[in-house]
Structure formats: structure tokens, C-alpha cells
């Protein structure tokens, strides 16, 4: 082994063989930065620019108006139901898939990923076909006075569908990598199954779990297509924040639309910051191979 | 106990909870995903082949599918080129703000599609920041198919960059050094040594971006203009048919799109299997 004091690592500038000429490097950096500025940064900036284009007073008025508050409340309720539901599912699915060997495992993983390859509009449509007035269960539900489509349950269902794989796909690879040795040790020392899960497994996966919940929540609060199909967009009742943005925008209340949109953009930025923080600090404890 | 020769569904294990976890997983998966999707397929099957064919070959359906595919292909192609440059710059070079820029690439995953939609429309409208620069040149973006491509570029970029990055990080620099010592120019090394390694993830990223773009709705409908036969994408056509209470047509178009995304999914898996055979990893 070389001692660092004797043989310091050569700086990159002395090894031009595996990098490009200086001007090529700077040209490529310029193209990449310009592309990201135009296609990613400018859309984000204009949201806040437009939101405050009539001053802070109008902004506050737009986001505290009755229908806007109802939309915010509904969005929070929907996320508060669908995220925990998919969290429990994700943990159960990862436990079954990562800690046991059984036939058809990879097929099961494919099925869990399925909602990602379905168009958001289709994700809403399938529930209309089942629970809608003309749907399979529509007449039966109507008899009992239960409404799912054009009501909150439909919105929750559609949101659960589109955020279905988020937690599971973060947990499965990392739990597979961790194997079963820790759990076997705990069990052989006499811990019960639940105690093993809460005291051994959960601490091992907590950052990956948080990571999955973060992404799941961002999508749950921001989902538009699936929710717009099942919601009916009744102001103050079945309007989530993204749907409220659309309604305001189509009524030519652009600034108010951007005010509500800026709250969602803020949520996106907080999500990105938290996600990046987790990635920087706990890179090893979050599954390395991520594909969205 | 089961002997080694009998067929067993699962290997024995001392870890408890398989029944509960597996049972819950299967029940939840069936109720939320499998049964509703099966309902869609069954509903389409009950239309009968002639009726399905009539809807599928309707000029408006075909125009919407052609537009969705054309715009998605264009956007995925542009993302493949610029995504390659962005990923390369982020992995290989060091410059101020690199880590921040890297984190920023995920914005389209985090930003709700409706927000992206109205933001892009405001930028590219004839009086917007970018639209007003393009207007004197006679280029109209918002409310035309070009606007759709812009929205789909936004949505698809992270798929290409995030698929390329891990593979780029694992490239063995010694091979590049070897190529250089044998007299290859940097461009030749890139074209003959580096690019072939990056081809499978580039194709995968392209296909992922394409699959996402074909089904995309929220970010597109604001900027598209939504004129039938001109700027009406396939997901929007489903919504239009639904609001007309024309369930058979909505169902048929949705099933068509589902088949298309399964074909894309299959293509992605084939690319990955091929690259595993060829390169042994990723």
C-alpha cells in the first residue's frame, strides 16, 4: 500500500487522457446548464413570479379563499389516507418478497410496478367503470346511498392506485440486500415476530422507508389526471389542490391559479430538498439502484 | 413435512409472518390494481371485435394516437440527446453548483403535472418569457403540437438522466486510458469504447421516457390547445369520451393505450435482458 504522504493522488488536470479538451468540457457544461435552466428552472421560477404578480395581498387572498382552503383540506385528507395505506402495503409486500423464497416472486414484483405503466387517466377510468352510475356496482351502490365516484372515496382510491408502488419499490431492494440474518438472530434469542420487526427490521430500513413515503406523498398531493376523472370537480367538496388550480386557470383567474400552484411547487421543493438530504447522508441505507 | 422432491410453493424459513404479509399483499394488490384493470379489459372484450375495431380505427382515435406517439417519440429523442449530455456533465465534470443541479434533475418527479402545465403555458404563450422571443421568428409553441413536445420533454428528462448516471459512474476508466495509449483520439474513444456501454441504459431511459410521455395528461392539456385532429392527445380523448358518457369508446381507447404501454414495458425488459447478456450487469 502506498502512503498518502509519499504518493499523493495526481490531480485530474495531469491526466488529460481520460477527459475531454478544456473547451469541449466547458461547452458541454454550458449546454447542460442552459438546457436545465430553460426546461426545469424557468417553469419553477415563473410559478412564483406569476403568483406574486399582483402583490402579496392578492396572493394571500387567493390561498385563503373558501374554496381554496377546502381544496387544501381535501388534498391533506386524501394524502393522509392513501400514504399510510400504501405504507402498510409496501412494508407487507417487501417483508413477503425480501425475507422469503417463493415461486412467482419476480412476477409479483412486476404486478406491483404495474400502476406506473398505466396512464393516469386510465387509472381514474377503471374506478368509474366499477363504481360509476353506469358501472358494475353502480346500481347496487345507489340503492344503498353510497357514492364513490364524484366523491372523496373515489379520489382516495385513484390516488392509492397511482402511488401504489412507491414505498414497496424502495423497500424491496434494500430488504433483499440486508437478507434475513439479523432477524434470525433476534428470533433465536427468543424475540417474537412483531418485536423482531419493530426492533430489528424497522431500524434497518427507516431511511429507505422515509424516502419512499416522501415520494409517495408528493405524488399523492399532486396527482391530477386520475383524480380529475373521478372527482366531478365540485367546488368546495371534491376539488383537490391540482384540480382547483385547473378550475381557476380555466376561469381566467391566472394569478389565483398560480398562487395555489405555488403552494404545490413549494411542496415539490421541500420534497426535493428532503430527498436530496436523505440521499447525501444515508446513501448506503437507501437502495442504490433507483428507477422511478 | 414436505420432502425435497415434492413441489413446494415456498422454501421453509424460521421467519414468521409470511402468511399474513403475503396474504395482505395479494388481497390489496387484487382489490386496488388487478380487479379494476381486469374490469377494463373485460368491459372492452364485451364490446366485441367489430365494435372495438370501429372505435380503434375511428379517424379521431387514430389522429390522437398518432399525435401522442409522434410527440412522445420526439420528446424522448430530444431527451436522449440532452439527457446524455446532462448525465455526462454531472458524472464526469466538477463545477460550482454541480450537486445542486444534480438534485434539481428530479424536479419533474416532484412537481405536480398541473403546475408544470400552467407554468410551461405561461412561458411559451405568445406574450410569455420564451414565447415572446419566438413570436417574431414566426414560431408558435403554446397551443400547438410543439407545445406538447415541450411538456413531454419536461416530464421525461429525469428518466434518461437517472438511468444513465449509475452506469456512467461504473465505467472502468482504465479501458479509456488503454484506448488513449493505443493512440485513439478522445472522440474515437468515446464513440467506440464509451458509447457502446451507454447504449443499453440510453435505450432503457428512452423507452421509460416514451412510456411515461404516451400516458401523460396533466402537463400537456394546458399547453396543447386540445383541438381534435390537431392537438388532442389520446389520454384527453378518453376524458372527452367519458364526459360524453360514451363509456365504450373511453374503454376501448384506454385498453389500446394499456396494450401499447405493456408493449413498451416488454421492450424495456428485453433491452435490459440483452444488456445483461452482453455486459453482465445493470
Image (tube, coloured by chain):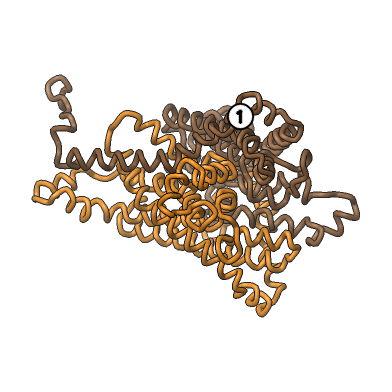
Chain colours: A brown, B orange
Question: Is B41 or A196 nearer to us in this picture?
Answer: B41
- Furthest residue to the right? A143
Secondary structure of the residue carrying numbered label 1: loop
Name the side, left or right, on which A131 lies relative to A196. right
Name the side, left or right, on which A23 lies relative to A189. left
Task: Using the image, determine if residue B132 lies above or below residue A193.
Answer: below
Name the side, left or right, on which A98 lies relative to B253. left
Kindly identify the residue that appears in the image at 65 percent across and 68 percent down: B252
Q: Residues within 10 Å of mark 1 (few under 14, many from 20)?
A: few
Q: Which residue is mark 1?
A: A54
Give residue A206's position: percent from left, percent from top: 54, 30
Name the side, left or right, on which B103 lies relative to A223. left
- Furthest residue to the top? A5
Give residue B145's position: percent from left, percent from top: 50, 58
Question: Is B116 or B229 nearer to us in this picture?
Answer: B229
Chain of the residue where label 1 is placed in the rendered structure: A
Kindly identify the residue that appears in the image at 65 percent across and 35 percent down: A256
Question: Would residue B170 be visible to someone looking at this image?
Answer: yes
- Furthest residue to the front? B136
Give residue B7's position: percent from left, percent from top: 56, 60
Task: Using the image, determine if residue B106 lies above or below residue B10.
Answer: above
Question: Is B215 or B116 nearer to us in this picture?
Answer: B116
Kindly identify the residue that appears in the image at 55 percent across and 47 percent down: A97
Give residue A40's position: percent from left, percent from top: 45, 40
- Furthest residue to the bottom? B50
Q: Quadrant of the N terminus of chain A?
A: top left
Amino acid at each position: 500500500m502506498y502512503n498518502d504522504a509519499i504518493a499523493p493522488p495526481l490531480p485530474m488536470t495531469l491526466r488529460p487522457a481520460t477527459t475531454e479538451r478544456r473547451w469541449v468540457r466547458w461547452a458541454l457544461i454550458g449546454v447542460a446548464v442552459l438546457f436545465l435552466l430553460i426546461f426545469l428552472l424557468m417553469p419553477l421560477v415563473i410559478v412564483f413570479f406569476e403568483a406574486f404578480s399582483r402583490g402579496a395581498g392578492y396572493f394571500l387572498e387567493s390561498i385563503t379563499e373558501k374554496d381554496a382552503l377546502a381544496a387544501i383540506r381535501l388534498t391533506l385528507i386524501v394524502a393522509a389516507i392513501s400514504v399510510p395505506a400504501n405504507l402498510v402495503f409496501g412494508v407487507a409486500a417487501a417483508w413477503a418478497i425480501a425475507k422469503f423464497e417463493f415461486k412467482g416472486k419476480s412476477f409479483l414484483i412486476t404486478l406491483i410496478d404495474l400502476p406506473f405503466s398505466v396512464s393516469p387517466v386510465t387509472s381514474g377510468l377503471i374506478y368509474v367503470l366499477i363504481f360509476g352510475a353506469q358501472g358494475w356496482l353502480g346500481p347496487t351502490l345507489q340503492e344503498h346511498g353510497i357514492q364513490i365516484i364524484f366523491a372523496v372515496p373515489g379520489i382516495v382510491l385513484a390516488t392509492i392506485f397511482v402511488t401504489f408502488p412507491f414505498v414497496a419499490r424502495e423497500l424491496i431492494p434494500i430488504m433483499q440486500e440486508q437478507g434475513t440474518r439479523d432477524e434470525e438472530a433476534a428470533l433465536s434469542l427468543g424475540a417474537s415476530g412483531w418485536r423482531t420487526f419493530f426492533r430489528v427490521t424497522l431500524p434497518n430500513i427507516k431511511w429507505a422507508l422515509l424516502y419512499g413515503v416522501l415520494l409517495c406523498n408528493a405524488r399523492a398531493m399532486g396527482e391530477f389526471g386520475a383524480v380529475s376523472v373521478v372527482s366531478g370537480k365540485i367546488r368546495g367538496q371534491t376539488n383537490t389542490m391540482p384540480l382547483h388550480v385547473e378550475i381557476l386557470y380555466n376561469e381566467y383567474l391566472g394569478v389565483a391559479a398560480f398562487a395555489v400552484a405555488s403552494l404545490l411547487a413549494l411542496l415539490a421543493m421541500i420534497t426535493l430538498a428532503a430527498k436530496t438530504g436523505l440521499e447525501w447522508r444515508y446513501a448506503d441505507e437507501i437502495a442504490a439502484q433507483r428507477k422511478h | 413435512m414436505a420432502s425435497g422432491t415434492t413441489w413446494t410453493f415456498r422454501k421453509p424459513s424460521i421467519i414468521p409472518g409470511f402468511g399474513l404479509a403475503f396474504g395482505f399483499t395479494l388481497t390489496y394488490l387484487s382489490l386496488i390494481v388487478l380487479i379494476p384493470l381486469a374490469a377494463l379489459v373485460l368491459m372492452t372484450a364485451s364490446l366485441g371485435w367489430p365494435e372495438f375495431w370501429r372505435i380503434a380505427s375511428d379517424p379521431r382515435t387514430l389522429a390522437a394516437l398518432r399525435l401522442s406517439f409522434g410527440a412522445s417519440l420526439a420528446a424522448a429523442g430530444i431527451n436522449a440527446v440532452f439527457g446524455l449530455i446532462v448525465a455526462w456533465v454531472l458524472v464526469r465534470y466538477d463545477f460550482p453548483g454541480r450537486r445542486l443541479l444534480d438534485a434539481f434533475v428530479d424536479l419533474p418527479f416532484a412537481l405536480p403535472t398541473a403546475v408544470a402545465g400552467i407554468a410551461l403555458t405561461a412561458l411559451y404563450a405568445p406574450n410569455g418569457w420564451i414565447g415572446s422571443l419566438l413570436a417574431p421568428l414566426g414560431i408558435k409553441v403554446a397551443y400547438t403540437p410543439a407545445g406538447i413536445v415541450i411538456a413531454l420533454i419536461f416530464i421525461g428528462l429525469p428518466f434518461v438522466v437517472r438511468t444513465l448516471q449509475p452506469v456512467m459512474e461504473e465505467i472502468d476508466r482504465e479501458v479509456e486510458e488503454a484506448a488513449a495509449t493505443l493512440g485513439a483520439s478522445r472522440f474515437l474513444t468515446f464513440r467506440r469504447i464509451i458509447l457502446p456501454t451507454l447504449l443499453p441504459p440510453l435505450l432503457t431511459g428512452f423507452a421509460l421516457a416514451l412510456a411515461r410521455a404516451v400516458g401523460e395528461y396533466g402537463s400537456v392539456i394546458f399547453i396543447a390547445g386540445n383541438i381534435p385532429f390537431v392537438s388532442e392527445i389520446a389520454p384527453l380523448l378518453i376524458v372527452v369520451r367519458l364526459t360524453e358518457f360514451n363509456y365504450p369508446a373511453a374503454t376501448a381507447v384506454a385498453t389500446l393505450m394499456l396494450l401499447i404501454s405493456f408493449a413498451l414495458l416488454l421492450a424495456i425488459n428485453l433491452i435490459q435482458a440483452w444488456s445483461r447478456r452482453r455486459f453482465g450487469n445493470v
